[in-house]
Image (spheres, helix red, strand yellow):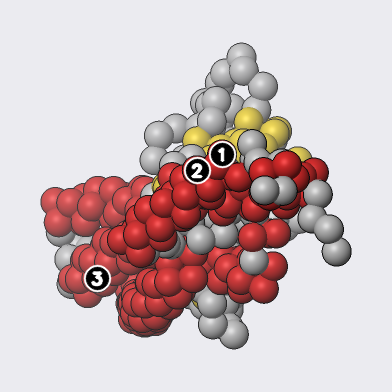
Amino acid sequence: MRITTKMTADNSLYNINEGRIKLDRLNEKIASGLQVNRPSDNPVATRKILDVESQIKNSDQFISNIKTGQTWLSLAGTSLEGLLSTVMDIKSTAGQAAGSINDPIKKADMLGQLKLFRDQLMDYTDAQVGNQYIFSGFKSDKAPFVDTSIPADITAGSPAITNIDATNLYPGVPISGPGIPANSTVATITTPGVGGAITISNPATATATPGTLTFSGTFQGTDDPLYIDVGSRVPIAMNVSAGAVLRGTQGGVDIIKTLDTLIAAISSGNVADIQTANIDLDKANQQVLSAVSDVGMRIARLDNALTSQERNANTLRTIHDDMQNIDMAAAAIALTQQKTAFDAALAATAKITPLSLLDYMR
């Protein structure tokens, strides 16, 4: 077969273009530091790299979840330790109450302390991460405990209050409002329910303001656990319900109500109720202690999960780097060799191209 000048030129141009492509790809790899810059470079390696990158993203998300859970549970643990200390202080005061109710000075001192402890209990559960309350369950945008105001028919000079929603009230709960003297509490619930009636510890005074009764301690959060996925088969709850811990909403002791009952019993000198409150405070102490222990165990699980996920992420990154990152020294040698071959091809083509058939007819 006769080799024409055009065939020689086309073949030379094809080889030069192939050399140029190889040279460009080597330059691209060195500039990017990557073996694969597009799927067409290596379809099989691309699939493996994308699979490892997906696993790395999952592991990073688990690590982020774990660190969020650690923050929430660490704050919850600190708050619960404060709650436990306060409950123990209340228990200590209650233990002295029966023998001190006949001493007016000691009695006043105990009542003052216990009223401060009541506010302190609810203050501990106001812990937040950012703008989220960690003790409010699904309603993390709201503080767990609020003051509740309800309309009522208040008659000056009378301890009776009628036409009131007494559903969430109980004897001993502190109340306030227009015409309600300071340090007043609910004495009895004469008629429970929405249209109920109560009596208070101090007769109401005259006021021009419409009757409104306010009491604190209403739990407005939920008892729902907020689970986080940490890579294990079983997710971990990162929150604690203030309702369960303080108000016994999951079948436990209502610590706030127990404290209110204790205050009322000390005020009235009711030794039997003081003793009952002491028994309930023993249970309350165990209730908070169990919550502290549970949080500690969950933190330990998160610590172990974090160690595992960090090791997994590091291993995956090493595998990814081995598949994707280039060996700069080897790439530089390959680039030099390819450039030498490319320059040689250009030089050879430059010498061959001017030749024609006449040059061979001698």
The residue nearer to you, when weighing 124 against 347, is 347
The residue where tag 3 is placed is 88
Answer few, some or many: residues within 10 Å of disc 2's Cα (few below 14, many 20 plus, some between 14 and 19).
Answer: few
Answer few, some or many: residues within 10 Å of disc 3's Cα (few below 14, many 20 plus, some between 14 and 19).
Answer: some
Q: Element at badge 1?
A: helix
Answer few, some or many: residues within 10 Å of disc 1's Cα (few below 14, many 20 plus, some between 14 and 19).
Answer: few
The type of residue carrying mark 2 is Ala
Spatial CA span between label 3 and label 2: 93 Å
Task: Give residue 350's mark.
Answer: 1
Spatial CA span between label 2 and label 1: 5 Å
Q: What percent of the width, then of the height, locates residue 311?
A: 37, 77
The residue nearer to you, when weighing 305 against 59, is 59
Q: What percent of the width, then of the height, locates residue 318?
A: 39, 72
Disc on the earlier residue, 3 or 2: 3
Image: 62 above or below 153: below
Q: Are marks 2 and 1 in contact (CB under 8 Å)?
A: yes
Q: What percent of the width, then of the height, locates residue 351?
A: 55, 42
The type of residue carrying mark 3 is Met
Callout in the foreground (3, 1): 1
Residue at (43, 67) in percent of width and height = 321
Q: Element at badge 3?
A: helix
The type of residue carrying mark 1 is Ala
Q: Quadrant of residue 359?
A: top right
Q: Are marks 3 and 1 in contact (CB under 8 Å)?
A: no
Residue 35 visible, this orientation: yes
The residue where tag 2 is placed is 347
Disc on the earlier residue, 3 or 1: 3
